[in-house]
Amino acid sequence: MFVQRERFEVFFDGACPLCRREVAALRRLEGGRGRIRFTDIEAPDFDPEAIGKTREELMARMHGRLPDGSLVTGVEVFRRLYAEVGFAPLVALTRLPGVRELLDAAYSVFARNRLRITGRCTDASCDPTRVAAPRP
Protein backbone atom coordinates (compact mmCIF):
# COMPACT_ATOMS: atom_id res chain seq x y z
CA MET A 1 0.00 0.00 0.00
CA PHE A 2 1.33 3.45 -0.97
CA VAL A 3 1.27 6.07 1.77
CA GLN A 4 1.63 9.73 0.79
CA ARG A 5 4.33 11.47 2.81
CA GLU A 6 3.40 14.66 4.57
CA ARG A 7 4.44 17.78 2.70
CA PHE A 8 7.19 20.26 3.37
CA GLU A 9 5.71 23.74 3.02
CA VAL A 10 7.78 26.60 1.69
CA PHE A 11 6.73 30.23 2.11
CA PHE A 12 7.92 32.32 -0.83
CA ASP A 13 7.58 35.90 -2.05
CA GLY A 14 5.42 35.60 -5.17
CA ALA A 15 6.15 39.22 -6.11
CA CYS A 16 9.87 38.44 -6.42
CA PRO A 17 10.92 37.51 -9.97
CA LEU A 18 13.92 35.49 -8.76
CA CYS A 19 11.74 33.63 -6.22
CA ARG A 20 9.10 32.84 -8.85
CA ARG A 21 11.74 31.34 -11.17
CA GLU A 22 13.15 29.22 -8.34
CA VAL A 23 9.68 27.97 -7.39
CA ALA A 24 8.88 27.16 -11.04
CA ALA A 25 12.09 25.13 -11.31
CA LEU A 26 11.34 23.31 -8.05
CA ARG A 27 7.80 22.52 -9.21
CA ARG A 28 9.18 20.99 -12.43
CA LEU A 29 11.75 18.95 -10.49
CA GLU A 30 9.13 17.87 -7.95
CA GLY A 31 7.05 16.51 -10.82
CA GLY A 32 3.66 16.76 -9.16
CA ARG A 33 4.44 14.23 -6.42
CA GLY A 34 2.86 16.54 -3.84
CA ARG A 35 5.83 16.50 -1.46
CA ILE A 36 6.19 20.27 -1.42
CA ARG A 37 3.48 22.80 -0.72
CA PHE A 38 4.30 26.22 -2.18
CA THR A 39 2.68 29.10 -0.26
CA ASP A 40 2.91 32.61 -1.69
CA ILE A 41 3.22 35.10 1.15
CA GLU A 42 2.11 37.88 -1.24
CA ALA A 43 -1.21 36.17 -2.02
CA PRO A 44 -4.17 38.31 -0.87
CA ASP A 45 -5.57 35.52 1.31
CA PHE A 46 -2.28 34.64 3.06
CA ASP A 47 -2.26 35.37 6.80
CA PRO A 48 1.25 35.34 8.34
CA GLU A 49 -0.23 35.19 11.83
CA ALA A 50 -1.51 31.69 11.01
CA ILE A 51 2.10 30.51 11.31
CA GLY A 52 3.07 32.86 14.12
CA LYS A 53 5.14 35.24 12.01
CA THR A 54 4.82 38.78 10.73
CA ARG A 55 5.02 39.70 7.07
CA GLU A 56 8.32 41.47 7.81
CA GLU A 57 9.79 38.31 9.34
CA LEU A 58 8.73 36.25 6.34
CA MET A 59 10.15 38.81 3.93
CA ALA A 60 13.47 39.00 5.81
CA ARG A 61 14.42 35.36 5.19
CA MET A 62 13.11 32.18 3.65
CA HIS A 63 10.82 30.05 5.87
CA GLY A 64 9.58 26.50 5.59
CA ARG A 65 7.32 24.35 7.71
CA LEU A 66 8.03 20.70 8.45
CA PRO A 67 5.21 18.15 8.62
CA ASP A 68 5.31 18.35 12.44
CA GLY A 69 4.56 22.10 12.23
CA SER A 70 8.02 23.34 13.22
CA LEU A 71 9.63 26.07 11.13
CA VAL A 72 13.05 26.15 9.50
CA THR A 73 14.66 29.24 7.98
CA GLY A 74 17.38 30.37 5.64
CA VAL A 75 19.60 27.91 3.80
CA GLU A 76 18.00 25.00 5.64
CA VAL A 77 14.80 25.63 3.67
CA PHE A 78 16.72 25.23 0.41
CA ARG A 79 18.40 22.09 1.72
CA ARG A 80 15.00 20.57 2.50
CA LEU A 81 13.54 21.62 -0.85
CA TYR A 82 16.39 20.24 -2.92
CA ALA A 83 16.50 17.01 -0.92
CA GLU A 84 12.78 16.57 -1.72
CA VAL A 85 13.40 16.87 -5.46
CA GLY A 86 16.22 14.32 -5.55
CA PHE A 87 19.41 16.19 -4.74
CA ALA A 88 19.97 14.70 -1.26
CA PRO A 89 23.61 13.68 -1.96
CA LEU A 90 24.47 17.23 -3.04
CA VAL A 91 22.54 18.68 -0.10
CA ALA A 92 24.65 16.56 2.27
CA LEU A 93 27.74 18.40 1.02
CA THR A 94 26.20 21.72 2.07
CA ARG A 95 26.17 20.52 5.66
CA LEU A 96 29.92 19.96 5.83
CA PRO A 97 31.83 22.15 8.31
CA GLY A 98 32.99 25.30 6.60
CA VAL A 99 30.61 24.87 3.67
CA ARG A 100 27.61 25.25 6.00
CA GLU A 101 28.96 28.47 7.52
CA LEU A 102 29.93 29.91 4.13
CA LEU A 103 26.48 29.25 2.66
CA ASP A 104 24.71 30.62 5.75
CA ALA A 105 26.79 33.82 5.61
CA ALA A 106 26.22 34.23 1.86
CA TYR A 107 22.48 33.73 2.30
CA SER A 108 22.36 36.33 5.09
CA VAL A 109 23.96 38.89 2.76
CA PHE A 110 21.56 37.95 -0.05
CA ALA A 111 18.50 38.08 2.24
CA ARG A 112 19.39 41.58 3.45
CA ASN A 113 19.79 42.78 -0.14
CA ARG A 114 17.15 40.69 -1.95
CA LEU A 115 14.80 43.58 -2.69
CA ARG A 116 17.63 45.72 -4.03
CA ILE A 117 19.01 42.82 -6.14
CA THR A 118 15.58 42.14 -7.66
CA GLY A 119 14.84 45.84 -8.29
CA ARG A 120 12.05 46.08 -5.71
CA CYS A 121 13.38 48.74 -3.35
CA THR A 122 11.17 51.28 -1.71
CA ASP A 123 12.39 53.89 0.72
CA ALA A 124 11.29 51.73 3.66
CA SER A 125 12.32 48.30 2.32
CA CYS A 126 15.87 49.25 1.39
CA ASP A 127 16.66 51.73 4.13
CA PRO A 128 20.33 51.09 5.06
CA THR A 129 19.56 51.83 8.70
CA ARG A 130 16.95 49.03 8.98
CA VAL A 131 17.69 46.04 11.16
CA ALA A 132 19.55 43.25 9.38
CA ALA A 133 17.86 39.92 8.79
CA PRO A 134 18.17 37.71 11.87
CA ARG A 135 20.80 35.01 11.89
CA PRO A 136 19.70 31.39 12.27
Image: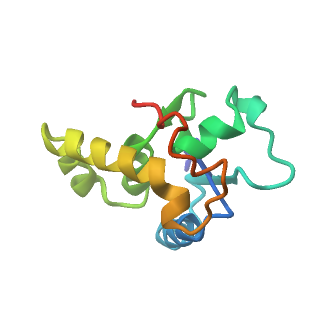
Pinpoint residue 5: horizontal percent, then vertical percent. Answer: 55, 44
Specify the farthest residue to the right: 45
Q: Nearer the viewer, residue 132 or 19?
A: 132
Please give the name of the residue rendered at 62% of the width and 64% of the height, measured from the top-left corner: 120
Please give the name of the residue rendered at 55% of the width and 53% of the height, measured from the top-left corner: 35
Residue 8 visible in the current orientation: no
Give the vertical position of 62 relative to 135 (above or below). Answer: below
Looking at the image, how many numbered discs can be counted on the residues? 0
Pinpoint residue 58: horizontal percent, then vertical percent. Answer: 62, 41
Q: How is the image coloured?
A: rainbow
Judged left or right of residue 87, residue 35 is right
Give the vertical position of 5 relative to 32 (above or below). Answer: above
Give the vertical position of 69 relative to 4 (above or below). Answer: above
Task: Give the position of the C terminus as an image quadrant.
Answer: top left
Q: Nearer the viewer, residue 72 or 44?
A: 44
Please give the name of the residue rendered at 46% of the width and 54% of the height, measured from the top-left corner: 113
Residue 28 visible in the current orientation: yes
Judged left or right of residue 19, residue 135 is left
Judged left or right of residue 49, residue 38 is left
Pinpoint residue 123: horizontal percent, then vertical percent. Answer: 66, 53
Pinpoint residue 124: horizontal percent, then vertical percent. Answer: 66, 47
Q: Nearer the viewer, residue 45 or 18?
A: 18
Quadrant in which residue 48 is drawn: top right
Please give the name of the residue rendered at 61% of the width and 35% of the height, measured from the top-left corner: 57
